[in-house]
Image: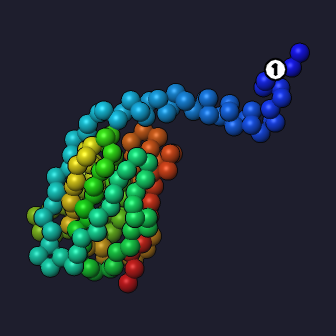
Amino acid sequence: MTTFMDRLPRPCVARAAVRIAALPFVIAIAGCAGTTAPVAQSTAPPDNAAGTVTVVLADFSFSPDPITLHVGAPVRLRLVNQSTGGHDFSAPKFFAASSFPAGSAAPTDGGVEVGPKQTVEVALTPQTAGTYPVTCTHFLHSLFGMTATIDVVR
């Protein structure tokens, strides 16, 4: 006697097995949605700020991607978390290659925590051209696609 699973093509069975195996992780992520994390303090924008770049943090995405900035051009990054769970904007190499207005410093450990439905602003000036990775370091968020790049151009 054949079963329903026996009649399915092998690739379908393999995909179903992967989805079933991933289910506990998805449930764990969903459980994180109600948690809150400490929110980083905003830094004041430099007096000669060239502009503001808004980066939206949603469930498993950053937008825009890539984020394009210019060497030597002061900018205020406005990090807007639209989801009901916490996220962070982790870009240690980018923050290390940037300068910050007097009285402020690079984010601790190269990341900025943004709580649910919150906005955090960081003023800085990119100093070195290059492409820098951005991730959300919350459990499994980058695995589910919450990554981006920052392109600093001349």
Q: With respect to residue 116, does 110 lie above or below?
A: below
Q: Residue at x 47, y 29 (%)?
A: 27
- The location of residue 148, given as percent across then percent down, is 44, 60
Q: Residue at x 81, y 35 (%)?
A: 10
- The location of residue 97, given as percent across then percent down, is 33, 69
Residue 36 visible from this viewpoint: yes
- The location of residue 47, given as percent across then percent down, is 11, 76
Query: Which residue lies under the disc numbered 1?
Result: 3
Local SS, label 1: loop
Q: With respect to residue 26, does 43 lie above or below?
A: below
The quadrant of the rendering that contains the C terminus is: bottom left
Q: Residue at x 39, y 68 (%)?
A: 67
The image quadrant of residue 128 is bottom left
Q: Residue at x 30, y 32 (%)?
A: 34
The quadrant of the rendering that contains the N terminus is: top right
Q: Is residue 38 left or right of residue 65?
A: left
The image quadrant of residue 86 is top left
Q: What amino acid type is highlighted by mark number 1?
A: Thr
- The total of numbered circles placed on residues is 1
Q: With respect to residue 41, does 65 lie above or below?
A: below
